[in-house]
Image: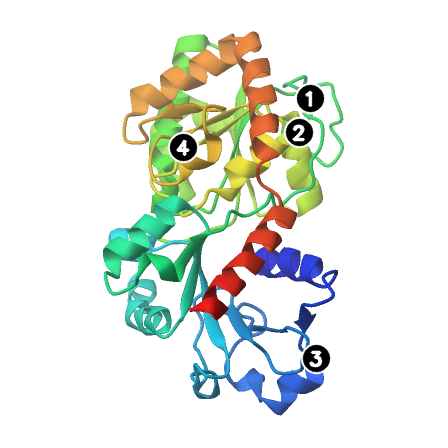
Amino acid sequence: MSNYAKNLSSIFDKIRHIEFISEDFSKNLNLRNFFDPSFFKFWLFAQKSKTPDVLHNPWFGKWPEWSKDDKKWRRCLTVHDLIAWKHPEWFPSEVTGYRQRWCNWIKQSNFLICVSAATKNDLLEIFPEVLEKQTAVVYLGPSLKNGSHDTGNPSNHSANLPPALVGREYLLSVCTIEPRKNLGRLLLAYKEFKETTKSDCLLALVGGTGWLQDIEELLRPLGKFSSDVVVTGYVPNEMLSSLYKNALAFIYPSLYEGFGLPVLDSMSMGVPVITSNVSSLPEITGESALLVNPFQINEIAEALCTIYSKSELRKELSAAGLERSKLFSWERCAAETMQAYEKALAM
């Protein structure tokens, strides 16, 4: 969520009639009592004055008591997903336990920005008291700077790659290790892919440890093929960009997403994408990716075999993804967020 805050605020800084309220003003309101600045962050924007017209909470965070005067300002909350409501079984109990607090913060908001139409539909389904006129869909921009893709040539630009991947073909998946990301089925599909193609292609799993899953347990059914899976853990953005640029293809069979930022990052890098045909993912990819049923291991495996064996298809998906990614930018996100503010103020 911090990237969302950083990218939007950097663009808003350039807009003269939108002002980020100063540190001194924040101190006067004693904001530090209401949020953890390392995760939650309140934005206070003022139009042509030092009194904010809109309070924008970029993630589920507590609205302070002083903010609840509708005559002074509008409270705008960004909803990134409602997966904890849709599938609580994918989360530890402490996360699902927060839902009542999150419910209160949603209900206390005057306006709700959703990062996809899929998330908006979930919001209206779970909270029937929320009116459609109180919502807007505003898409995110990519989290990484665009760069040229090397179409899987292992000799190209290996700097910043983990040593195990240098000079090797590999498929890439970027996600936290947690049930929703569907790594168990992906790994079984990769085993089927290896048995079918007899290839030396590796699978790179990139991302930090999450919850309710152990990567060693997930790897055990692969047998001898487990040594072809490179688990990097969290990597800095410089290495992550290199991993995208040098990947043969990106595979993301998530069971549910509110947006699907890794998919957009892949498309913006020109990496061919395989992803799920559920939730927001078809909305983000359009026709520029291979879509699979994430619950069907053989379908995921077949897509891996197809994208590995057909270089022309990879080129087509690479070009289509790059073109599709141009629809998503932080400039557009900022402009449409401004429109949401105006809509909230008009209510």
161 or 217, which lies in front? 161
C-alpha gap between disc 2 and disc 1: 6 Å
> Is the residue marked by circle 3 packed among few (<14), some (14-19), or many (20+) residues within 10 Å?
few
Say whether disc 1 or disc 4 marks the residue closer to the N-terminus. 1
On the image, numbered disc 2 is attached to which residue? 245
- Look at label 3 and name its amino acid: Ser
From the viewer's perspective, is 157 left or right of 88?
right
The residue to which callout 1 is attached is 150
The disc, 1 or 3, on the residue closer to the chain's N-terminal end is: 3
Give the alpha-carbon distance from disc 1 to disc 3, as whole Å: 44 Å
* Residue identified by numbered label 3: 22
Nearer to us of marks 1 and 4 is 4
Question: Going 54% across and 37% down the picture, which residue do you hit?
Answer: 264
Among the two numbered marks 3 and 4 on one chain, the one whose residue lies closer to the N terminus? 3
Q: Are marks 2 and 1 in contact (CB under 8 Å)?
A: yes
**Mark nearer the N terminus (4 vs 2):** 2
